[in-house]
Amino acid sequence: MLEVVAAVPGIVNGLIHHIKSLQGMRHDGGWIGHLLYEAENERMHLMTWMDISKPVMWEHGFFAVFSLLYMVSPHTAHRVVGYLEEEAVTSYTHFIGDIDAGRIENVKAPEIAVAYWNLDPESTLRDVVLAVRADEALHRDTNHHFSDCIRAKRESLFEDMDTNSNKPHIKY
């Protein structure tokens, strides 16, 4: 289950950006908030699936390995996470297919999922999987984007905002 290690990249990356921002006494360009949100969101995915399936934990050592990868090559680390998230989207798509085909029972959604995603109280497992898959697609796109930004040496995420004068633009 990818969710077991999925929260690690966001927290590691957010921590490293936070420390660099403090050391340089400069704005982080919007990275920290995105990364910590992703870590929190992935943590909630894990807690939801633990409530449903009670998985075996196997993430020992991943935190250290990923931290080292991020320190050596942030571009590669984000690209790897992007690919892991792509696999998660595919896996959740198959999961939905199995629910629809009746191979997996479409049980009531756990309370933790209903509360976190603000789902209808009558929501089912399928509704949870749809919400998680949407999150994973966003994480996939975000991490590939972060990798591209690092490779292009664009430190601020705000550089990607539309600078059309008809739209609001934030500058730091």
Image (tube, rainbow, N blue to C red):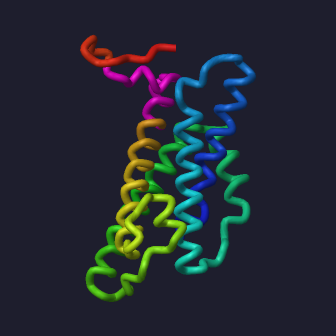
The one nearer the camera, 157 or 167, is 167
Q: Along the horizontal axis of the image, is 162 left or right of 26?
A: left
Please name the residue shown 42% across and 54% down the image: 135
The one nearer the camera, 171 or 119, is 119
The one nearer the camera, 49 or 81, is 49
- Residue 99, position as x, y percentages in the image: 33, 80
Q: Quadrant of residue 120?
A: bottom left
- Residue 136, position as x, y percentages in the image: 42, 55
Q: Along the horizontal axis of the image, is 91 left or right of 64?
A: left
Q: Residue furthest top?
A: 165
Please name the residue shown 44% across and 49% down the image: 139
- Residue 86, position as x, y percentages in the image: 40, 56
The one nearer the camera, 76 or 122, is 122
Q: Is residue 96 above or below residue 136?
A: below
- Residue 73, position as x, y percentages in the image: 60, 38
Q: How many marks?
A: 0
Task: Please tell me whether residue 160 belongs to the stretch shown in magenta.
Answer: yes
Please name the residue shown 47% across and 36% down the image: 146
Q: Is residue 49 above or below residue 77?
A: below
Task: Please tell me whether residue 140 belongs to the stretch shown in magenta.
Answer: no
Segment tinted magenta in the rendering: 147-162
Q: Is residue 130 above or below residue 42?
A: below
Please name the residue shown 64% across and 46% down the image: 11
